[in-house]
Image (cartoon, rainbow, N blue to C red):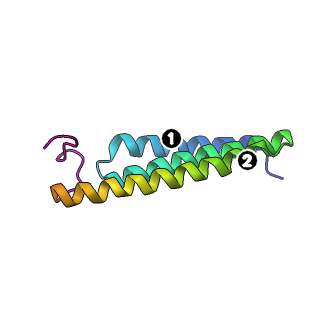
Amino acid sequence: MVPTHFYLVLAGILFTIGVIGVLVKRNPIVIFMCIELMLNAANLTFVALGRHFGQTNGQMYVVFALAVAAAEVSIGLGIIVMMFRQKETIDIDEVHLLKY
Protein backbone atom coordinates (compact mmCIF):
# COMPACT_ATOMS: atom_id res chain seq x y z
CA MET A 1 0.00 0.00 0.00
CA VAL A 2 1.43 3.35 -1.08
CA PRO A 3 1.38 6.08 1.59
CA THR A 4 -0.79 9.12 0.96
CA HIS A 5 2.06 11.60 1.09
CA PHE A 6 3.62 9.98 -1.99
CA TYR A 7 0.48 10.81 -3.95
CA LEU A 8 0.49 14.35 -2.59
CA VAL A 9 4.13 14.88 -3.52
CA LEU A 10 3.46 13.57 -7.03
CA ALA A 11 0.44 15.88 -7.34
CA GLY A 12 2.57 18.82 -6.18
CA ILE A 13 5.23 18.04 -8.77
CA LEU A 14 2.64 17.72 -11.54
CA PHE A 15 0.99 20.98 -10.50
CA THR A 16 4.35 22.78 -10.44
CA ILE A 17 5.21 21.51 -13.93
CA GLY A 18 1.83 22.77 -15.13
CA VAL A 19 2.32 26.23 -13.61
CA ILE A 20 5.79 26.54 -15.11
CA GLY A 21 4.43 25.48 -18.49
CA VAL A 22 1.66 28.09 -18.37
CA LEU A 23 4.10 30.83 -17.43
CA VAL A 24 6.84 29.93 -19.91
CA LYS A 25 5.15 28.63 -23.07
CA ARG A 26 3.61 30.84 -25.75
CA ASN A 27 1.64 28.25 -27.71
CA PRO A 28 -2.00 28.21 -26.54
CA ILE A 29 -2.36 24.46 -27.16
CA VAL A 30 0.60 23.76 -24.87
CA ILE A 31 -0.86 26.17 -22.33
CA PHE A 32 -4.14 24.21 -22.37
CA MET A 33 -2.20 20.98 -21.89
CA CYS A 34 -0.45 22.50 -18.87
CA ILE A 35 -3.79 23.63 -17.44
CA GLU A 36 -5.06 20.08 -17.87
CA LEU A 37 -1.97 18.83 -16.05
CA MET A 38 -2.77 21.14 -13.15
CA LEU A 39 -6.39 19.94 -13.07
CA ASN A 40 -5.22 16.32 -13.06
CA ALA A 41 -2.87 17.10 -10.16
CA ALA A 42 -5.84 18.48 -8.23
CA ASN A 43 -7.86 15.37 -9.14
CA LEU A 44 -5.06 13.15 -7.86
CA THR A 45 -5.08 15.10 -4.60
CA PHE A 46 -8.85 14.72 -4.25
CA VAL A 47 -8.69 10.97 -4.79
CA ALA A 48 -5.68 10.45 -2.52
CA LEU A 49 -7.18 12.41 0.36
CA GLY A 50 -10.56 10.75 -0.12
CA ARG A 51 -8.87 7.37 0.13
CA HIS A 52 -6.85 8.50 3.13
CA PHE A 53 -9.94 9.61 5.04
CA GLY A 54 -12.07 6.71 3.82
CA GLN A 55 -14.67 8.81 2.03
CA THR A 56 -15.92 8.93 -1.53
CA ASN A 57 -16.21 12.72 -1.64
CA GLY A 58 -12.87 13.01 -3.42
CA GLN A 59 -14.04 10.82 -6.27
CA MET A 60 -17.23 12.84 -6.62
CA TYR A 61 -15.20 16.06 -6.90
CA VAL A 62 -13.05 14.43 -9.58
CA VAL A 63 -16.12 13.66 -11.71
CA PHE A 64 -17.20 17.31 -11.53
CA ALA A 65 -13.65 18.53 -12.24
CA LEU A 66 -13.45 16.29 -15.31
CA ALA A 67 -16.73 17.73 -16.59
CA VAL A 68 -15.41 21.27 -16.12
CA ALA A 69 -12.13 20.34 -17.81
CA ALA A 70 -13.96 18.93 -20.83
CA ALA A 71 -16.02 22.10 -21.17
CA GLU A 72 -12.91 24.25 -20.78
CA VAL A 73 -11.06 22.38 -23.50
CA SER A 74 -13.93 22.49 -25.97
CA ILE A 75 -14.44 26.24 -25.53
CA GLY A 76 -10.69 26.93 -25.55
CA LEU A 77 -10.07 24.95 -28.71
CA GLY A 78 -12.99 26.74 -30.37
CA ILE A 79 -11.41 30.07 -29.48
CA ILE A 80 -8.04 28.91 -30.83
CA VAL A 81 -9.62 27.83 -34.13
CA MET A 82 -11.39 31.17 -34.53
CA MET A 83 -8.18 33.01 -33.62
CA PHE A 84 -6.29 31.08 -36.31
CA ARG A 85 -8.98 31.77 -38.92
CA GLN A 86 -8.88 35.51 -38.27
CA LYS A 87 -5.18 36.16 -37.63
CA GLU A 88 -3.49 33.22 -39.44
CA THR A 89 -1.37 32.56 -36.34
CA ILE A 90 -1.88 31.19 -32.84
CA ASP A 91 1.21 32.75 -31.24
CA ILE A 92 0.05 34.57 -28.13
CA ASP A 93 2.56 37.40 -28.53
CA GLU A 94 1.42 38.19 -32.06
CA VAL A 95 -2.33 37.95 -31.53
CA HIS A 96 -4.22 40.74 -29.81
CA LEU A 97 -7.67 39.43 -29.02
CA LEU A 98 -10.65 41.76 -28.86
CA LYS A 99 -8.82 44.25 -31.12
CA TYR A 100 -9.52 44.60 -34.80
Q: Residue 60's mark? A: 2
**Residue matched to label 1:** 16
Helix, strand or loop at label 1? It is helix
Q: Identify the residue at image location x=20%, y=44%.
A: 93
**Residue 23 horizontal side relative to residue 83, left or right:** right
Amino acid bearing label 2: Met
Residue at screen point 35% across, 57% down: 78
Start and end of the magenta stretch? 89-100
Across and down, in percent, residue 84 comes to 23, 59
Eyeballing the image, is 88 above or below 96? below
Instruction: Please give the name of the residue rendered at 64% of the width and 48% of the height, measured from the top-left corner.
Output: 64
- Does residue 65 lie above or below 89 as drawn? above
* Dot placed on the residue nearer the N-terminal end, 2 or 1: 1
Residue 30 in magenta stretch: no
Residue 77: give x, y in percent of width and height. Answer: 37, 57
The residue depicted at 45 percent of the width and 40 percent of the height is: 19
Amino acid identity at mark 1: Thr
Give the dominant element type of the magenta stretch: helix, strand or loop: loop
Return the x and y of residue 5 as percentages of the image width and height. 73, 40
Disc 2 secondary structure class: helix
Front-lying residue, 36 or 76: 76
In this picture, residue 61 sits left or right of residue 56 = left
Query: Where's residue 99, x and y in %?
Result: 16, 40
Q: Which mark is residue 95?
A: none
Structural crowding at the residue carrying mark 1, measured as other residues with C-alpha within 10 Å and reported as few (<14), some (14–19) or many (≥20):
some
